[in-house]
Image (tube, rainbow, N blue to C red):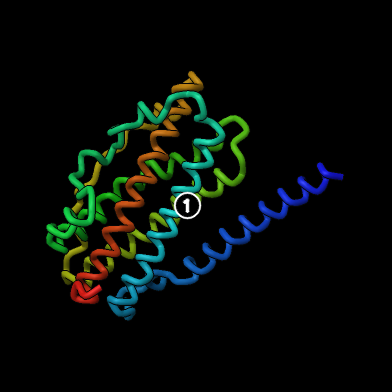
Amino acid sequence: MGNKGASLKGLLLVVLLVSNTFLTKKAVTSLPICPNGSVNCQVSLGELFDRAVKLSHYIHFLSSEIFNEFDERYAQGRGFITKAVNGCHTSSLTTPEDKEQAQQIHHEDLLNLVVGVLRSWNDPLIHLASEVQRIKEAPDTILWKAVEIEEQNKRLLEGMEKIVGRVHPGDTGNEVYSQWAGLPSLQLADEDSRLFAFYNLLHCLRRDSHKIDNYLKLLKCRLIHDSNC
C-alpha cells in the first residue's frame, strides 16, 4: 500500500510539472513577437520588448530545466563540470559578465550583441534537437525541451531583428556571430566523450540564455522606461 501511495504521489508530481510547463509555454507562445508575414508590425516598441523579455525568460527557464535534467541523468560522477569551464563557442563574442558591465555598453551595441548571440545558437540548437534523440534512453522531457528551445530561439531572434529595426530604422543588426563546429563531438562513438559534448553545449546554453535574459531586461529599462526602473 505504501509503494502504491508513493507511486501515485510521484505520478501526480509529474502531471503537475508537465501542466505547469504547458501553461507557461501557452502563455508565452500565444504572444507572437509580431504576426507572421507582417511587413510593418504595428505593435509598440514597449510591447515588443515585453514579449521579447517574456520569451527570453521562457527560453532560460527551459535551458535550466534541460541542463539540470541531463546533469542528473547522465553526468553524475563523470567530472564534467570541471572540464566545461570556458568551453563555449560564443566565447569569441565579448559579452559583459554582470549588470554593471552591461550598463557601460551603448544600447545599439548591446542590441547587436543580443542578436549576435541568438544567431550563434541557430545551428547548434538545430543539431541538438536532432542528435539528442540518439542518446540512450533519453527521456521525452529532454527531447521536447530541445525542440522547443530551438523553435523559441528562432522566434526571439526574429523579434529582436524587428526591435533593432524599430530603434534604428533601416538597420537589422550586424551579421557578427560565432561559428559552431561541435557537431562531430555530438556524434562521437565514445559514450563519455559524446555525453560531455552534450553536457558542455547545454551548460553554455544555460549561461548564454541567462545573459540574454538580463541584457533584454536592461535594454527594456533603458529604452522604454528611460532607465527609471
Counting from the top left corner in percent of width and height, residue 28 is at: 47, 66
- Image x and y of residue 195, in percent: 48, 28
Residue beneath disc 1: 62
- Location of the C terminus by quadrant is bottom left
Extreme-front residue of the structure: 2
Residue at horizontal 29 percent and vertical 76 percent from the top: 46
Q: Quarter of the image containing the N terminus?
A: top right
**Looking at the image, which is closer to me, 38 or 49?**
49
User: Is 3 placed left or right of 108 in the picture?
Assistant: right
Quadrant location of residue 37? bottom left
The answer to whether 117 appears left or right of 151 in the picture is left
Nearest the camera: 91 or 207? 207
The kind of secondary structure element at disc 1 is helix
136 w.r.t. 50: above or below: above
Give the percent coordinates (x, y) of residue 34: 37, 72
Residue 33 sits in which quadrant? bottom left
